[in-house]
């Protein structure tokens, strides 16, 4: 039996995966006096009062106590609403408790001199934190226009006093108490008579969840009190000196170049970088800021992917945290979702939840408009529904956002109630309606793509091509016959005949043939055969049409009379290596062919037409800019859609979804098929279960 680490609290038990990974032991739940066998350590949450029981149990059993804590870049919001991206395991003490040694302190005492690589890594970390204004919690907006305005114009003439919450373990652990805060305020006022003194209340004090120390004290002095939420870095960039008892923000003040005065003993005091007003209980050696950064962020903390839970490095964790933070603040306007079917609501909720909370779902338009006006919210509606209500919504002076599936959607069809992993939320129009500009068209027309955008697009395009991904990622059930090598092989992809992209983007084809004989699909096939009488044409029906779920079916004999091959039941990726060209009305297959360097001719006006990458028989008049394929990818797959992680049901970068789709498509077990069928049945009945439709490890 493998060695175990005992966990006594339900809260830490929910984080047992982290405990197991960091300790190298198998977590087990202990409820004394019943204790599992083979326990070799006890885990608890830091040295806070909630961990007293675990510490006493460890002491009684003569076992090592392992203290776990949140790391120094944790999440967007505080509390259990989000999983931490950084975790600390300390087998000696804990960093905020100066009454005893800690692993952090030991690393700083024993640490060797940094080599060139370590030095550059620490410098890069400081620059990243400062430039992107990352802190432990990141729910306050980081944008400079939200910075507070002060009386004095000189940064050196401003002094910042940091509040903390009563009962916080870092206060007693920092050898401080309530009188320490009184001493700090008195000294700050006395020592800085000509400075503007600013008191920053703790966010949890502002919300009323906890009490602080400085609100009452500040009223006794002529100081500026900041109670509004503000990103810590926006404050640190505006002050020259910071007074603190033991707040982590004092360490970030050092990173920001501020002078820091400590009235307690936080982990960063006593190393020669701070003005320490409290005696240090143990001798500490001189350490540079880069040496402390190296230990704090690279040797003491461990980092985990927000979506997969896998171990990652500091810089990847910071990048993920920036994504989560930016998405949170991007959704700062209240949303009223109207006419969204029940099975799609979790998708919309996951992608639109943010600083303004989760979207509210209201079925009636009158009620939705009333609520939108009351809350200054936008109305969110699906494609055709948005078109039908646009005149009334805009007439009421309420913003309207159109929702549609993204271009990397799922493994399976939406018509079969397979949930989407990408959606677009368009404030201007919608990508398949060329009559009006869409957000995507504006992105492609106006964005100055940065080298980082193009680098990401190049990597994404290669990943999609290598993994043979498409919108629906259906398995091929048909083998290709031998194809001619002495003439062009042209793919003609069928579409849903009454789809909005056909109605709006290829009206010339839609009107020429009735739906009863295939509509625009038949018109397109005739047009392509007329253009290429000697080519080998492959007609591939749309999978929704093949499944009998949507309109657009062409009689087989009719299709076979125009095409050399009707490729039913086959997948798009199996065709791409053998075709020389795609001719399409507005099908996404044209875009997917461009990703693979295949020539594309458009008969309608899809979103990817008009940028110099396709031969357009009916070119969109507004699109004058010439794009590279990777600029098109950056706009269409990086900047335009939202993506949803199927495991956590939270917004994520496109790479997470690409990996999830690639992994899910490779799973072909009967059990997976049965589970997906069960989910489809639930979705069809308007119900939704918060379950994992993809296995994390297959």
Image: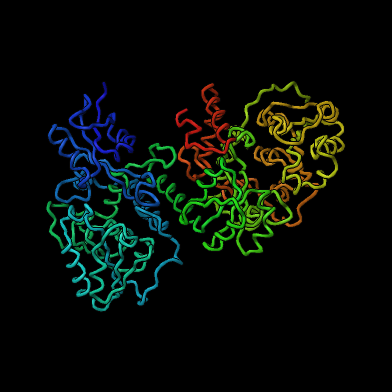
Residue 191 in view (yes/no): yes
Q: Nearer the viewer, residue 548 or 214?
A: 548
40 on left or right of 360: left
Q: How is the image coloured?
A: rainbow
Q: Position of residue 255 (x, y in %)?
A: 32, 58
Q: Is residue 444 above or below residue 551?
A: below
Q: Residue at x 42, y 56 (%)?
A: 132
Q: Nearer the viewer, residue 28 or 398?
A: 398
- Quarter of the image that includes the N terminus: top left
Looking at the rendered structure, the number of numbered marks drawn on it comes to: 0
Q: Is residue 130 above or below residue 316?
A: below
Q: Position of residue 469 (x, y in %)?
A: 60, 34
Q: Is residue 372 above or below residue 362?
A: below
Q: Position of residue 182 (x, y in %)?
A: 18, 67
**Residue 219: quarter of image:** bottom left
**Residue 368: quarter of image:** bottom right
Residue 581 in view (yes/no): no
Q: Position of residue 680 (x, y in %)?
A: 57, 32
370 on left or right of 203: right
Q: Is residue 572 above or below residue 156?
A: above
**Residue 578: quarter of image:** top right
Q: Nearer the viewer, residue 545 or 397?
A: 397
Q: Nearer the viewer, residue 579 or 586?
A: 586
209 on left or right of 479: left
């Amino acid at each position: 039996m493998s060695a175990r680490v005992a966990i006594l609290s339900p809260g830490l038990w929910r984080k047992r995966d982290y405990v197991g990974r960091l300790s190298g032991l198998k977590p087990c739940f202990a409820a004394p006096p019943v204790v599992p066998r083979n326990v070799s350590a006890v885990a608890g949450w830091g040295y806070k009062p909630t961990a007293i029981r675990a510490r006493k149990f460890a002491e009684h059993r003569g076992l090592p106590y392992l203290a776990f804590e949140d790391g120094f870049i944790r999440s967007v919001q505080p509390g259990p609403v989000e999983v931490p991206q950084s975790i600390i395991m300390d087998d000696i003490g804990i960093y905020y408790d100066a009454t005893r040694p800690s692993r952090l302190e030991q690393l700083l005492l024993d640490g060797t001199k940094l080599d060139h690589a370590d030095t550059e890594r620490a410098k890069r970390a400081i620059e990243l934190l400062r430039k992107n204004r990352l802190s432990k919690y990141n729910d306050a907006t980081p944008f400079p226009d939200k910075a507070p305005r002060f009386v004095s114009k000189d940064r050196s003439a401003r002094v910042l006093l940091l509040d903390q919450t009563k009962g916080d373990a870092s206060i007693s652990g920092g050898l401080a108490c309530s009188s320490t805060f009184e001493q700090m305020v008195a000294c700050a006022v006395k020592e800085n008579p000509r400075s503007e003194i600013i008191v920053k209340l703790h966010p949890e004090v502002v919300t009323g969840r906890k009490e602080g120390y400085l609100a009452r004290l500040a009223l006794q002095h002529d100081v500026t009190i900041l109670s509004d939420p503000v990103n810590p870095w926006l404050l640190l960039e505006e002050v020259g000196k910071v007074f603190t008892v033991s707040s982590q923000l004092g360490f970030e003040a050092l990173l920001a170049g501020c002078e820091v005065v400590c009235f307690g003993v936080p982990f960063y005091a006593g190393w020669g970088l701070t003005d320490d007003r409290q005696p240090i209980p143990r001798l500490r050696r001189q350490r540079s800021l880069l040496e402390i950064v190296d230990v704090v962020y690279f040797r003491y903390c461990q980092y985990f992917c927000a979506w997969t839970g896998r171990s990652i490095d500091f810089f990847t964790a910071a990048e993920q945290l920036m994504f989560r933070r930016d998405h949170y603040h991007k959704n700062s306007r209240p949303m009223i979702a109207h006419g969204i079917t029940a099975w799609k609501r979790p998708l919309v909720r996951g992608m639109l939840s943010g600083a303004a909370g989760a979207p509210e779902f209201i079925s009636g338009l009158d009620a939705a408009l009333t609520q939108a006006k009351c809350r200054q919210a936008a109305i969110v509606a699906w494609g055709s529904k948005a078109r039908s209500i646009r005149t009334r919504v805009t007439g009421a002076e309420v913003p309207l956002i159109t929702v549609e599936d993204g271009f990397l959607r799922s493994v399976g069809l939406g018509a079969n109630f397979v949930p989407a992993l990408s959606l677009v939320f368009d404030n201007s129009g919608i990508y398949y309606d060329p009559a009006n500009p869409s957000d995507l068209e504006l992105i492609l027309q106006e964005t100055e793509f940065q080298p980082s955008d193009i680098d990401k697009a190049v990597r994404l395009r290669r990943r999609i091509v290598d993994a043979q991904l498409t919108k629906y990622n259906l398995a091929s059930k048909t083998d290709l016959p031998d194809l001619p090598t002495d003439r062009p092989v042209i793919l003609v992809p069928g579409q849903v005949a009454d789809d909005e992209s056909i109605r709006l983007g290829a009206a010339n084809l839609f009107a020429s043939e009735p739906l009863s004989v295939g509509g625009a699909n038949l018109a397109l096939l005739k047009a392509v055969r007329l253009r290429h009488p000697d080519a080998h044409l492959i007609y591939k029906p749309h999978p929704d049409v093949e499944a009998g779920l949507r309109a657009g079916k062409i009689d087989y004999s009719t299709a076979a009379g125009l095409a050399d091959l009707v490729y039913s039941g086959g997948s798009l990726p199996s065709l791409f290596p053998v075709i020389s060209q795609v001719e399409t009305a507005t099908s996404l297959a044209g875009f997917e062919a461009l990703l693979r360097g295949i020539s594309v001719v458009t008969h309608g006006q899809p979103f990817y037409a008009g940028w110099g990458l396709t031969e357009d028989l009916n070119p969109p008049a507004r699109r004058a800019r010439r794009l590279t394929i990777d600029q098109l990818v950056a706009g269409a797959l990086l900047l335009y859609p939202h993506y949803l992680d199927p495991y956590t049901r939270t917004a994520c970068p496109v790479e997470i979804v690409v990996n999830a789709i690639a992994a899910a498509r490779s799973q072909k077990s009967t059990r997976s098929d049965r589970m997906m069928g069960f989910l489809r049945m639930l979705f069809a009945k308007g119900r939704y279960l918060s379950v994992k439709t993809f296995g994390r490890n297959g």
